[in-house]
Image (cartoon, rainbow, N blue to C red):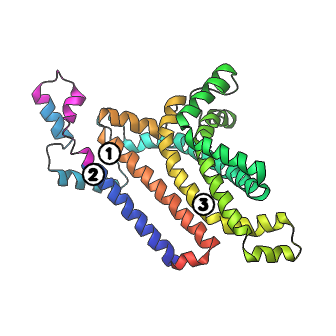
Amino acid sequence: MLTFLIRRIVAGAALVVVVATATFLLLNLTGTDVARNILGETAPRSAVTAKSHELRLDQPLVERYWHWAEQALRGDLGSSWFTGAPVNQSLVDTLPVTLSIVLAGLLLAAVLSVALGTAAALRGGWVDRMVQFAAVLGTAVPSFLIALVLAVTLAVQLGWLPATGYVAIDASLTEWLRSIILPAVSLAVAATAATAMQVRGALMDVLRADYVRTLRSRGLSTRSVVFRHALRNAAPPALTVLALQFIGLISGAVVVEKVFGLPGIGTLANSAAVRGDAPVLLGTVVVTVSIVVAVNLLLDIVYGWLNPKVRVS
């Protein structure tokens, strides 16, 4: 098991390095005069030259990358070129917002997909057809449209939940929950649709297996067969889809945060991209990829627990 984990950690670290390097190169090969953008079109040339020197933009690309990589390895992702705010602090301020709605959406999707997929596999008939129709509809409708509908109906018209803003969990647990419900539901719809169909298909395959018929012939109830045996064997394919949905939820959070006015990492990355703030963009990419790698590592551990054969594959 230790060798299994080491291989996964090394592969994840290599992925972070490759993505960070590619992002750095792309951001520094755009040909944009960043110093001019920061100081404005009316700034004298001498000031622009001084600013370029301050930001190390007059150095060779390899030297700039090495300097950034050394800082990043020490845990320092630099400072914003436009505001001077440390990137680390900006991420600390915005990351909890994004993780709150993404993890809440993922948890909601996991619960609903297991319930819907299991119901479709066991009952069949009109229940199965309704679940399949809802899955197609949930996959087809974009998350930003769902977010707009929820914001207009439940927040603006009915006033049940806040339409915009975010309350930190340490300020008020109740208000934190109220502020993330609509964004989390907006993100969860598509993830639920895709995962529910995977749960349905995997569970139907497992229920047709010989060992399931053997368990039933021994007098075990359907509830016991499904929840103690079948769902565990049907879990790996569903977990794979759910892990992929996690990546999709992070990208979808960029739009959902804009709709609900949430100060998350998606909003931070979007504003940095508009301004060309390379340190902030690099920081958000490194942190986002690291989170994805950590989630996949956790998924591998769960796989190894569910199926020991995975550990040696």
Q: Position of residue 144 (x, y in %)?
A: 53, 34
Q: Secondary structure at mark 1?
A: loop
User: Which residue lies under the disc numbered 2?
Assistant: 68
Residue underneath mark 1: 78
Which amino acid type is shown beneath numbered disc 1?
Answer: Gly
| Residue 175 position in % (x across, y down) | 66, 32
Callout 2 secondary element: helix
Residue position for label 3: 239
Residue pictured at 37% horizontal, 41% vertical: 86
Total marks placed: 3
Point 67% across, 65% down: residue:
234
| Drawn side of residue 91 relative to residue 227, left or right | left
What label does residue 69 carry, if any? none
- Type of amino acid at the residue the image marks with label 2: Trp
Highlighted magenta segment, given as a residue range: 26-47
Q: Quarter holding the N terminus?
A: bottom right
Residue in the picture at 67% in, 28% down? 161
Gap in angstroms between the C-alphas marked 3 and 2: 36 Å
Asked if residue 88 can be seen in this view, the reply is yes
| Residue at mark 3 to residue at mark 1: CA–CA distance | 36 Å
- Depth check: give the residue in front, 227 or 130: 130
Q: Is residue 231 left or right of residue 171?
A: right
Q: Residues within 10 Å of mark 2 (few under 14, many from 20)?
A: some
Q: As displayed, is residue 223 above or below residue 120?
A: below
